[in-house]
Amino acid sequence: MDQETANKLVVEALQKKQKTKSKFYFSDLQDILGMKPREAKKYVNKMVEMGILEFWSSGSTTMYGLKGTGKQAAAEHED
Amino acid sequence: MAKHQTPLLDQLESGPWPSFVSDLKQEAEARAKNERNIEYQIPQDVVEDLMGVLELSYKDGTTHWKHGGIVGVFGYGGGVIGRYCDQPEQFPGVAHFHTMRVNQPAGKFYTTKYLKELCDLWEFRGSGLTNMHGSTGDIIFLGTTTPQLEEIFYELTHKHNQDLGGSGSNLRTPSDCIGQARCEYACYDTQALCHYLTNEYQDELHRPAFPYKFKFKFDGCPNCCVASIARADLSFVGTWRDEIQIDQEAVKAYVAGEFPPNAGAHAGRDWGPFDIQKEVIDRCPTGCMRYEDGKLEINNRECTRCMHCINVMPRALKPGKDRGCSILAGAKAPILDGAQMGSLLVPFIKVEEPYDEIKEVIEAIWDWWMEEGKNRERLGELMKRQGFQKLLEVTNIKPVPQHVQEPRTNPYIFWKEEEVPGGFERDIKEFRKHHQR
């Protein structure tokens, strides 16, 4: 799979769920991509690097979201 | 006068121990005076607002911090933890109060100059408050604002040759004991292994893709000074596989009272003359020692490496010469399922560069856990859910009695069909010839 196809797959899948969910576990992304974890990680890292995805961290758990989406991002932009 | 009245916090200073409240007040005062004319990059009264919000939390009986956040430095998913206050108008100094984790040097060796430089950077760009080597082991910078994060990261990496540590669902900052640098008990070079694996697994440290946190900790001997066995998903505990080295003359000298036992520790009161029977032989958990006719004997096959005799008589006893480490898996603090100690996975492994055998074990475990682990499931919980036998399978390690808890009283062995010659299928007619229905 090339990066572009992966980006499209992930963005479409996350946008679909946007109404109910803005943060996703790595395993959700892995399922969307249908890959083994290590392989999926390469694509996901690239998406973070490209600014498509961003990390959210509670300190103990890390999740991923589409950049600029979600309650937290909204709170950030209020400042 | 203080910006906020804090009667509940003040009460914490009345106990017998040094209080963090006193430290906070000291830092608040120093920032207010600013005798070194620092151009503070975040609010000067940040510490006073921190005390204010904590006082309010005590009063309300609830936290005023929001849960997590989207902050970090470019390309890193760990090392920065977003902290936002839900009372920013009342306490503007801590509206953003992000934590940064700094990867401590192996063995926590650093010069005062290095420490001073880090503190200067943090006074300038952060709150000035730190948490040194708490349960994570790393250096924690408490409280800064979003725009400062990249600046601090740049200075740390470019000026101080220093990286951020781990947080979130990734490999946490590996942590080790002081090791062979200062300790004669260390059975392998903990600092070398800790440093090597930190560099080797940079991607796992900085780019989170694990189901949850994962910790390595390295102890040079079974005294376990970094408590790896209690809190690391993979703990590396130094050990030996030959015989404890005995200097019989030194044993006699201890018995004669020429050397203080325990290297002089616990000497605050008079315990009476040293009694080797009572203090060493009877304390051996496996009862594998005896002292007769001025000679100490150890049945090394029975020794569980508890270190007690060595700790009591360090001039007479030393770990054996064939040294390496044991690898234990699955320890964790409570949250789900309660606290768990590590389970012995590799009884003995040599710790030698390039550490290929150790890496094989680590990577096999990661592959299994990344594939099978549920979200927020620690390795120890996965081991419980799928069984220790599964862990042995994925790491390709042959079961040995050391893997079984109480092997002498627990003879239960679960065989799989492929492990039994001829399998489980039997010729029923042949069976009936010898066994009636």
Image (tube, grey):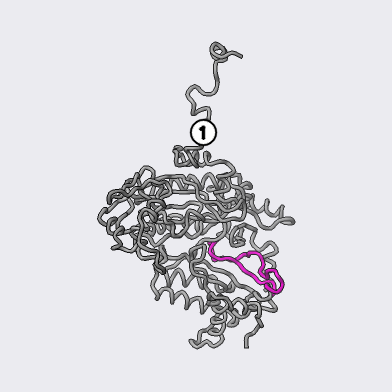
Q: Is residue B30 magenta?
A: no
Q: Is residue B63 magenta?
A: yes
Relative to B76, does residue B392 appear above or below in the rendering? above
Image quadrant where residue B179 sits: bottom left
Q: Which residues are magenta?
A: B58-87
Picture residue at 35% right of the left edge, 49% below the top: B240
The amino acid type found where label 1 is placed reads: Ile
Few, some or many residues within 10 Å of mark 1 (<14, 14–19, 20+)? few
For the C terminus of chain B, the image quarter is: top right
Residue B85 is situated, as x and y percent measured from the top left of the image, at 66, 72
B271 sits left or right of B60 in the view: left
Q: Nearer the viewer, residue B167 or B336?
A: B336
Picture residue at 69% right of the left edge, 62% below the top: A70
Relative to B9, does residue B165 appear above or below in the rendering? above
**Residue B335 visible in this rendered orientation of the protein:** yes
Residue bearing the label numbered 1: B413
Residue B91 is situated, as x and y percent measured from the top left of the image, at 66, 78
